[in-house]
Image (tube, rainbow, N blue to C red):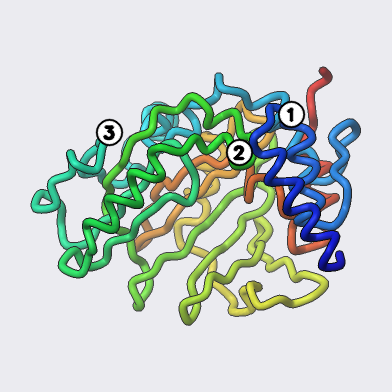
Amino acid sequence: MNFFKRKFYRFYVDFLKGSNNDVKYLKAQYYLKNERKLDIEDPKEFTEKIQWLKLFYYTEAYKDFADKYEVRKYVKDKVGEGVLNEIYGVYEHPEEIELNDLPESFVLKCTHASGTNIVVKKKSRLDWRKAKKQLNKWLADNYYKKSRERIYKDIQPRILAEKYLSGLADGSIIDYKFYCFNGRPEYVLVKVEENGTDKKCYYTMDWEKVWPENITKSFLVTDIPKPSNFDEMRDVAVKLSQGFIFVRVDLYSVSGKTLFGEMTFFPTGGIKRLGVERLNKEMGDLIKLPRR
């Protein structure tokens, strides 16, 4: 896409952001990101079907599965509270948070959105005024407006304070994101930080790495050993994904213990096509859309 065309589409996306036409907005956003049209009338690829589910299936009725606090009740009922991370408090406003009551390291995350996290490794170094300003900004936003994910539209904005997790020598942790189709995990996206940069790759359920056609800077070349509790993680993903056409179940493995992260219905908002070209069609085929 040349400079002028990209500039036009950026303007067009910004213009449509304030409209109520979700389909037009998503089509423009998708084209800007992928330089190809979004087929929402006859979707075939993974991200196209994710957009369809976003618009016509996973509506406001599913909000408790996206709410980072309310989903804990579902997880506890399905697999037990042993997989839930420890929480220190739930707050409606940053002013309610008493820093003295929190440990030296913790995480603050908004319950009504995605990517709205403040990781505090050392409380003594936290700029609390700046953090409160950021939290208030996030709380004032309705995440639905960003990528038209209706599942987030009616979630009550709150702040969750939970235990900081680390599993590697540098204090970071590996994410294991299970892509589940009708209650069946098919792939796991492994995400880890290397030298300050997020790296990721897909593994099959047999723990075979899926290599992309072209290696990019974000591809995790390093081999990640299969977790000792992988079978348990897979079982948790199976139980939590039952009854859903598609959902990604995000888990952690900390010293051999399985911990729940969140349930994600629209990876990357369904905006960016998968980095492994063949998976766009293969994962798309695994999503069986209902008839409208």
Question: In front here: 273 or 30?
Answer: 30
Q: Which mark is residue 92?
A: 3
- Of the image marks 2 and 1, the number of the one nearer the N terminus: 1
Q: Mark 3 against mark 1, which lies toward the viewer?
A: 1
Q: Which residue is mark 1?
A: 21
Q: Quadrant of the N terminus?
A: bottom right
Q: Is residue 275 above or below residue 94?
A: below
> What's the residue type where badge 2 is placed?
Phe
- Of the image marks 3 and 1, the number of the one nearer the N terminus: 1
Q: Name the side, left or right, on which 271 lies relative to 124.
A: right
Q: Mark 2 against mark 1, which lies toward the viewer?
A: 1
Label 3 to label 1, Cα distance in Å? 31 Å
Question: In front here: 198 or 34?
Answer: 34
> What's the residue type where badge 1 is placed?
Asn
Q: Which residue is mark 2?
A: 265
Q: Name the side, left or right, on which 172 lies relative to 31.
A: left
SS at badge 2 = loop
Q: Quadrant of the C terminus?
A: top right
> What's the residue type where badge 3 is placed?
Glu
Q: Can you see residue 288?
A: yes
